[in-house]
Amino acid sequence: MNAPSSSRAPRRRHAARGFTLIELMITVAIVAILARVALPSYLEYIKRGKMTEAFNTLSTFSLAMGQWYQDNRTFVGACGTSGLAAAPTGQNFTYDCPTLTATAYTIRATGQNSLAGFTFTLDQNGVRQTTATASGSGWPTNTTCWVSNKSGTCY
């Protein structure tokens, strides 16, 4: 008949699976270090992306101001709430015209929320200025261009 097998396979002990507490703590520490380095860079990247709204809107608004002048031979009356050269609205900036004379204008974009403190201007001669930046942000101002990052690169 069937004789019992004299050689039995030895039983293996299964090793515990998973992570040790030390491995988990090291992983958390590495992730925390990476986040501390990467998060400020990411926030600056987001800020620079939002600034393009002001640059594009001011450029477009300048064209409308030029058309207003051709139609009216003055900038006075432009930058109202309606019409060809109405002050635009935006998500991250408010727009206004602090200077309007017969032959000159200055249009301004003032940052809101995460861009509070940033102010960009454009005049009838196309002179771009960064007149203010967020306090303590490390961003420079510039009287000849719109600053688009902390290093002072112009847009």
Image (tube, helix red, strand yellow):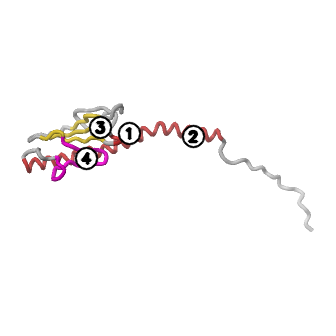
Give coordinates of residue 91: x percent, y percent. 31, 48
Q: Nearer the viewer, mark 3 or mark 2?
A: 3
Is 21 colored magenta in this rendering?
no
Judged from the image, the secondary structure of the residue bearing numbered disc 2 is helix
Mark toward the start of the polypeptide (3 vs 4): 4
Mark toward the start of the polypeptide (2 vs 4): 2
Give coordinates of residue 138: x percent, y percent. 35, 31
Is 94 colored magenta in this rendering?
yes
Q: Nearer the viewer, mark 1 or mark 3?
A: 3
Contact between marks 2 and 1 (CB within 8 A): the answer is no
Where, by quadrant of the figure, is residue 154 drawn?
top left
Give the quadrant of the C terminus. Answer: top left
Mark toward the start of the polypeptide (3 vs 2): 2
Instruction: Say what amino acid the circle numbered 1 marks.
Output: Glu
For mark 2, what is the residue? 28
Residue pictured at 27% horizontal, 34% vertical: 132
For mark 1, what is the residue? 44
For mark 4, what is the residue? 56
The number of numbered badges drawn on the structure is: 4
Residue pictured at 64% horizontal, 38% vertical: 22
Mark 2 nearby-residue class (10 Å; few <14, some 14–19, many ≥20) = few
For mark 3, what is the residue? 118
Segment tinted magenta in the rendering = 79-97
Mark 1 nearby-residue class (10 Å; few <14, some 14–19, many ≥20) = few
Residue placed furthest toward the left: 73
Contact between marks 2 and 4 (CB within 8 A): the answer is no
Instruction: Say what amino acid the circle numbered 4 marks.
Output: Asn
The answer to whether any part of residue 123 appears in the image is no
Q: CA distance from mark 1 to mark 3?
A: 13 Å
Q: CA distance from mark 3 to mark 4?
A: 15 Å
